[in-house]
Amino acid sequence: MSPTHTNAPARSLKERVVHALAFEGLAIALSAPALAWLLGKSLLHTGALTLAVSTLAMLWNMAFNAAFDRAQQRFGFTRGARVRIVHALLFELGLIVATVPLAAWWLSIGLVQAFVLDIGLLLFFLPYTLGFNWAYDVLRDRWLARDAAPPLEAAEAGGRM
């Protein structure tokens, strides 16, 4: 089993920013056009909303994942399927608290309507969050393993001696 699955990964602020930008960039590219079509609004209008929500989500993403990593270090749990599902649920629930009032104001709808819209988005973002973070961790493990491996030339030279 790789280190990211048994211990909390050590992530720099730079890595957290790259992770959050990749997550949110793909989310905007997928959700803004879908929202424009579903709500009958312009892509500019829904794009601005998704950008605002993305900004909130990016800040929440970095803070939440840093806290999650600390919790993993403290309690020593592994990142199996159950933990990843709990991670995704907690992340999305925290985001709902911030985004429902914003969506209600931006779209000129009531809080209940904004909540229903947010639940609809949750049906997309919950599996997206789970899949994105899982894929990110797998790719990160591969990058770290590749970076930790000695260069091919050094390995070959060591074998000849």
Image (cartoon, helix red, strand yellow):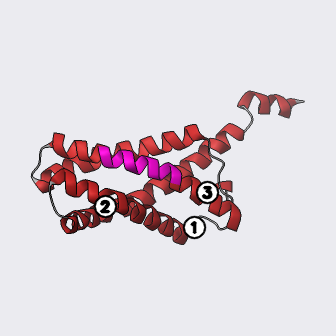
The residue identified by callout 2 is: 124
Task: Name the residue at 27% across, 62% down.
Answer: 118
Task: Name the residue at 49% across, 54% down.
Answer: 133
The image position of residue 18, as x and y in percent, is 49, 39
Q: CA distance from mark 2 to mark 3?
A: 24 Å
> Counting residues from the N terminus, which is met first, the one under dot 2 or under dot 3?
3
State which mark lies toward you, 1 or 3: 3
Determine whether, in the image, residue 147 is placed left or right of residue 23.
right
**Which of 4 and 19 lies nearest the eye of the viewer?**
19
> Counting residues from the N terminus, which is met first, the one under dot 1 or under dot 2?
1
The image position of residue 25, as x and y in percent, is 36, 42
Label 3 neighbourhood size at 10 Å, few (<14), some (14-19), many (20+)?
Answer: some
What are the residue bounds of the magenta stretch? 52-63
Q: CA distance from mark 1 to mark 3?
A: 14 Å
> Counting residues from the N terminus, which is met first, the one under dot 1 or under dot 3?
3
In the rendered image, the vertical position of residue 82 relative to residue 98, given as above or below: below
Q: Main secondary structure of the magenta part?
A: helix
Looking at the rendered image, the quarter that the N terminus falls into is: bottom right
Looking at the rendered image, the quarter that the C terminus falls into is: top right
The residue identified by callout 3 is: 69
The residue identified by callout 1 is: 80
Determine whether, in the image, residue 93 is placed left or right of residue 72.
left
Q: CA distance from mark 1 to mark 2?
A: 21 Å
Q: Secondary structure at mark 1?
A: loop
Task: Name the residue at 21% across, 54% down.
Answer: 105
User: Residue type at mark 2?
Assistant: Phe
